[in-house]
């Protein structure tokens, strides 16, 4: 009723942000993997639609692909450009100057209006910001959305109650305009003009050269289904006044809020709102900016999302492990290739004190393929010292390798682990005729495991048990890591990864380094072949008699040495400096990659000597490796059953019997049982 009083204030329906869980997962991965502490704003695009008549709220959708910027939009959907301001601490988030931030992006819009760049890209007429703090360890996200809008000293006013487009124009004109609009919005321009020519309404892009008298409606795709137009109109009115109505006598315009609904299976824009607006009081100077979103309590304040309850706990565990490692790349080692490290498959021979701790260290570095071999059972003395076993394991007397593998899966379900109850044949431990077939099967299984893994860890309880895996690993060019314990000492070492060239001296010109392909193995310092060290042992020799912390130290060092080696540009072939050099001759990403590390707790000292492979070594010499490759199990049986066979094959026996044998000094490393 025109005679009734109406409120002339132009009200606007604000946006209500809807942020998908997929977006938070995407931005979390981006922060952890790429951004780190960089707090530069991230551009993104959100979407809204003017085709939903059912909701009173005006939804802005931030989706999992919003950071990709180039969006494949469905029909009747429009994009809104924005920025993510990600803060690194909760204190920064709480203390941010919200008005300054709103002004920062509001001025971008104002500059675009005044420069006229809106005519080239109407999307720049509106924008949004999301201020965030990502608690990526707890999967809790704090955020506050803002939609910068121009506010002047006085507002525009309605000249009359809103009407519907179908009330403004006759049915045939509405039908014609609907067709023209359907063709026009393929451009998905959110703001446009409606011109009237020869009695027909025609949509047109925003053009500065079109006079105000030729414009029937200033139109925009209005996502509001409420009686009020959406927030988008605020900046649009300022833009209209600035470019068409400055100094003009005409100050009343018609605004078409296009609502693109479907009725009876056909497009229906007849319910679009038409507003007659007087902009004479709208000031172009002295603008401020408003636009912070209210939270779920209808108060101006941030929101919080907790995604833990909706996430797969196994995925949470995987993400948490990755996070702890990837944080290293934020400040300390940006070049660290964690994915490369995680790709290595590790075979642990021995699942005792060393094996358990090495497995835990590998897991902490993100290595997800860990296989264990051991033929022992869990005893009551094991759980306090061997970190993967429990009292229940000792009650049940399960196989160590299998129990350790199961324990790893309980600690981190994402690990790919198996345990093998396998006896490793050893030199000096004779194989009876009735045992030959079984031993042959065991050797074949061990070789298959060696071939299918990238790194071998020798962590067994006797010296001779390391011989066969050493030979196999060298023959198949695997990285071999070794750790052995004494009462208050430890030895950690890496083997050289062989190349095709023949053995020979491989020191640099200054004699400060040894090339990685010629580094010696665990047996290179022996002057006798490995034999049976397990017989005639007293109880203290059968069990691990070592200071408890020694195994922790050795396990940590052998894994850290491997990681440093994998991060070195030369990988397994990295050279090693000789002890006594003033500086590292071939530093890697994480520093030195020594050949051996010898530690002594009695003096809390550590040394890193290096030595070349011994041409007469009973494990890594060319004669041994060639015999293994050419003769296979036949060669192994001789080595197992004939104590002097390896010494004769390698020439070690002849060397010892020669006149110069007095110059050969035994430097064997003694280690106790790792029961």
Image: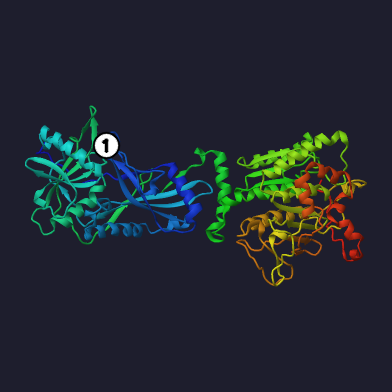
Relative placement, left or right, of 193 versus 482 is left
Image point (21%, 38%), residue name: 182
Q: Is mark 1 on a helix, strand or loop?
A: loop
Quickly name the residue at label 1: 51
What sort of colour scheme is used for the picture? rainbow
Quarter of the image with the C terminus is top right
Image point (74%, 70%), residue name: 580
The image quarter containing residue 194 is top left
Residue 309 appears in the figure: yes
Farthest left residue in view: 198
Q: Depth check: 600 or 88 in front?
A: 600
Q: Depth check: 54 or 553 in front?
A: 553
Image coordinates of residue 673 in percent, x first then y, are 83, 49
Q: Depth check: 193 or 470 in front?
A: 470
Image coordinates of residue 510 in percent, x first then y, are 70, 72
Image point (83%, 51%), residue name: 463
Image coordinates of residue 225 in percent, x first then y, are 25, 38
Residue 385 appears in the figure: no
Against 422, residue 582 (above or below) is below
Image point (74%, 41%), residue name: 446
Farthest top residue in view: 264
Q: Residues within 10 Å of mark 1 (few under 14, many from 20)?
A: many
Q: How many labels were placed on the picture?
A: 1
Q: Depth check: 296 or 641 in front?
A: 641
Image coordinates of residue 557 in percent, x first then y, are 71, 56
Quarter of the image with the N terminus is top left
Relative placement, left or right, of 357 versus 326 is right
Relative placement, left or right, of 376 versus 409 is right
């Amino acid at each position: 009723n025109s005679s009734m009083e109406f409120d002339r204030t132009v009200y606007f329906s604000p946006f209500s942000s809807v942020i998908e869980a997929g977006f938070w997962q995407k931005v979390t991965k981006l922060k952890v993997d790429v951004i780190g502490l960089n707090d530069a704003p991230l551009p993104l695009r959100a979407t809204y639609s003017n085709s939903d008549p059912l909701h009173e709220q005006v939804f802005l959708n931030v989706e999992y692909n919003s950071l990709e910027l180039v969006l494949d939009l469905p029909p009747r959907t429009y994009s809104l450009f924005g920025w993510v301001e990600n803060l690194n601490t909760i204190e920064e988030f709480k203390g941010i100057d919200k008005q300054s931030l709103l002004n920062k992006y509001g001025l971008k819009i104002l500059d675009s209006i005044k420069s006229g760049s809106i005519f080239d890209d109407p999307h720049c007429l509106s924008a949004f910001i999301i201020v965030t703090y990502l608690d990526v360890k707890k999967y809790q996200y704090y955020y506050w959305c803002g939609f910068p809008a121009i506010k002047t000293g006085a507002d525009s006013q309605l000249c009359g109650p809103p009407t519907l487009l179908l009330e403004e124009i006759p049915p045939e004109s509405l039908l014609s305009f609907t067709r023209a609009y359907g063709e026009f919005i393929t451009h998905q321009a959110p703001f446009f003009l409606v011109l009237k020519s020869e009695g027909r309404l025609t949509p047109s892009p925003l053009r500065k050269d079109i006079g105000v008298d030729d414009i029937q409606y200033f139109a925009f795709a209005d996502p509001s289904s409420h009686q009020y137009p959406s927030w988008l109109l605020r900046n649009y009115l300022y833009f209209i006044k600035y470019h068409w109505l400055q100094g003009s006598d005409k100050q009343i315009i018609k605004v078409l809020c296009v609502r693109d609904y479907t009725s009876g299976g056909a497009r229906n824009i007849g319910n679009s709102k038409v507003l007659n607006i007087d902009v004479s009081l709208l000031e172009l100077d002295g603008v401020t900016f408003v636009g912070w979103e209210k939270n779920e309590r209808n108060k101006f304040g941030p929101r919080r999302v907790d995604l833990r309850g909706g996430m797969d706990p196994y995925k949470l565990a995987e993400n948490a492990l990755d996070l702890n490692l990837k944080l290293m790349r934020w400040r300390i080692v940006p070049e660290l290739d964690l994915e490369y490290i995680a790709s290595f498959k590790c075979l642990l021979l021995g699942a005792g004190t060393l094996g358990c701790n090495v497995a835990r260290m590998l897991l902490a570095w993100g290595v997800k393929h860990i296989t264990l071999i051991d033929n022992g059972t869990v005893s009551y003395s094991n759980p306090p010292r061997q970190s993967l076993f429990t009292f229940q394991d000792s009650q049940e007397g399960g196989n160590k390798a299998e129990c350790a593998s199961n324990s790893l899966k309980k600690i981190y379900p994402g690990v790919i682990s198996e345990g093998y109850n396998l006896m490793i044949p050893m030199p000096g431990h004779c194989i009876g005729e009735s045992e030959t077939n079984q031993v042959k099967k065991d050797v074949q299984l061990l070789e298959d495991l060696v071939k299918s893994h990238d790194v071998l860890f020798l962590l067994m309880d006797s010296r001779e048990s390391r011989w066969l895996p050493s030979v196999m690993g060298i023959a198949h060019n695997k990285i071999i890591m070794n750790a052995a314990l004494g009462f208050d000492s430890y030895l950690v070492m890496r083997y050289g990864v062989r190349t095709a060239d023949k053995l020979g001296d491989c020191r640099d010109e200054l004699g400060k380094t040894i090339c990685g392909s010629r580094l010696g193995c665990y047996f290179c310092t022996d002057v006798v072949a490995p034999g049976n060290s397990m017989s005639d042992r007293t109880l203290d020799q059968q069990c691990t008699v070592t200071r408890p912390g020694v195994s922790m130290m050795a396990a940590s060092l052998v894994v850290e040495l491997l990681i440093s080696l994998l991060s070195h540009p030369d990988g397994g072939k990295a050279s090693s400096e000789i002890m006594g050099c003033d500086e590292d001759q071939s530093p890697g990403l994480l520093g030195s990659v020594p050949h051996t590390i010898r530690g002594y707790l009695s003096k809390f000292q550590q040394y890193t000597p290096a030595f070349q492979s011994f041409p007469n070594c009973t494990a890594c010499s060319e004669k041994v490796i060639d015999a293994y490759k050419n003769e296979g199990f036949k060669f192994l049986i001789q080595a197992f059953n004939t104590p002097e066979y390896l010494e004769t094959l390698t020439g070690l026996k002849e060397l010892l019997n020669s006149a110069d044998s007095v110059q050969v000094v035994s430097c064997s490393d003694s280690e106790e049982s790792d029961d």
